[in-house]
Image (tube, rainbow, N blue to C red):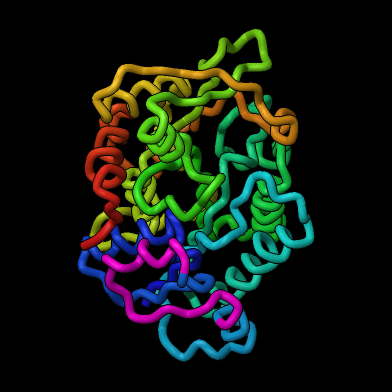
């Protein structure tokens, strides 16, 4: 049995989809109530059961899981980069993760958990997933700090040879609509362009970056889950490697690159309106990110990511235009 926490969410449901494509349906989805927009993420997928996240934690802590678990994909978290309640973030993103990790150790289950590129902060210390650099990272927001705290717990407790932590960069693609303000720029751009014919982008506050030339490592969710499943070998493909790894494209693209690709996919000429950045995110804003993917390549991962324009075209035309979700 495989367990996916946050399994009704964006990356979690995409992992379920990818497992289904490999013929695996012995999956338990752990998440919050899915009566809202998350429900659509699961409708086209196959899994054995759905368990509420709080109920699941109680089962873990009481030792009440009475079935064999091969691996846990721990994607569940508060993923809001503007959340300021540190107590809430520690409870959800740190303590919950510790409980699952300890259970996996006791029950010989693989533990593959979501860290985040938000741990890299402004990139002053680079974007290398070398263990030596992780303690020096300075996240710009409390969400990133909570992810850094769990990475450090893994390192300090000498669990790097037991767990696999994945630092996801700017993931976009189908099944993210429920994320509201935390949706990708690509998803928000599609809605704005369809509604108004134009797109609002933040002006740059740093002279070394012109407006729209802030850069991100954008990675399509289909590529991201392909990398994720590499660490849980299925049908002889992949390699169970432990440690902490970047999950990105290894390429930095500008906001304008992504924006222009959305306009192109919709058959429209680009129309950009520049707006001021809100005060509450000015000090938390990443101007550049690009994953160093050498460590994943050394582990044996060989597939290439889709080009940004091609992945945005796939996302817009196959999913957003038709209001489709990942399904099998």
Magenta extent = 36-55
Report the label total.
0
Q: Is residue 196 above or below residue 28?
A: above
Q: Name which residue lies at 27% across and 42% down.
A: 321
Residue situated in front as seen by the camera: 61 or 297:
61
In the image, residue 288 lies at what x, y percent?
Answer: 57, 24
Residue situated in front as seen by the camera: 43 or 92:
43
Residue situated in front as seen by the camera: 193 or 318:
193
* In the image: residue 164, left or right of residue 203: left
Q: Name which residue lies at 71% across and 41% down.
A: 141
Q: Name which residue lies at 62% across and 65% down.
A: 97
Residue 131 appears in the picture as rendered:
yes
In the image, residue 240 lies at what x, y percent?
Answer: 39, 58
In the image, residue 24 lies at what x, y percent?
Answer: 26, 70
Q: Name which residue lies at 25% across and 55% down.
A: 237
Q: Residue 249's quadrant in the figure?
A: top left
Residue 294 appears in the picture as rendered:
no
Residue situated in front as seen by the camera: 300 or 216:
216
Question: Where does the C terminus fall, quadrant-wise?
Answer: bottom left
Q: Is residue 73 magenta?
A: no
* In the image: residue 121, left or right of residue 266: right
In the image, residue 305 lies at what x, y percent?
Answer: 31, 35
Question: Where does the N terminus fall, quadrant-wise?
Answer: bottom left
């Amino acid at each position: 049995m495989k367990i996916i926490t946050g399994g009704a969410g964006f990356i979690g449901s995409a992992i379920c989809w990818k497992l289904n494509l490999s013929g695996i349906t012995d999956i338990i989805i752990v998440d919050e109530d899915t009566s809202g927009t998350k429900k659509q993420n699961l409708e086209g997928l196959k899994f054995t059961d759905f368990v509420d996240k709080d109920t699941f934690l109680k089962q873990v802590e009481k030792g009440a899981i009475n079935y064999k678990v091969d691996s846990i994909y721990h994607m569940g978290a508060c993923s809001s980069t503007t959340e300021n309640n540190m107590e809430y973030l520690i409870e959800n993103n740190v303590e919950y993760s510790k409980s699952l990790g300890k259970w996996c150790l006791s029950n010989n289950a693989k533990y593959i958990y979501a860290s985040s590129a938000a741990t890299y902060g402004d990139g002053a210390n680079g974007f290398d997933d070398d263990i030596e650099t992780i303690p020096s990272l300075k996240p710009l927001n409390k969400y990133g700090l909570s992810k850094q705290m769990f990475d450090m717990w893994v390192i300090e407790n000498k669990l790097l040879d037991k767990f696999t932590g994945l630092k996801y960069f700017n993931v976009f693609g189908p099944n993210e609509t429920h994320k509201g303000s935390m949706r990708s720029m690509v998803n928000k751009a599609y809605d704005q362009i369809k509604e108004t014919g134009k797109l609002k982008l933040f002006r740059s506050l740093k002279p070394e970056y012109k407006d729209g030339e802030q850069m991100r490592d954008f990675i399509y969710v289909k590529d991201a889950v392909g990398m994720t499943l590499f660490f849980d070998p299925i049908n002889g493909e992949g390699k169970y490697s432990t440690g902490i790894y970047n999950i990105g494209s290894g390429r930095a693209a500008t906001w304008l690159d992504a924006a222009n690709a959305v306009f192109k996919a919709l058959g429209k000429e680009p129309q950009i309106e520049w707006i001021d950045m809100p005060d509450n995110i000015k000090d938390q804003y990443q101007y550049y990110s690009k994953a160093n993917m050498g460590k994943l390549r050394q582990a044996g991962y060989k597939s290439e990511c889709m080009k940004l324009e091609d992945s945005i075209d796939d996302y817009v035309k196959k999913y957003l235009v038709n209001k489709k979700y990942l399904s099998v």
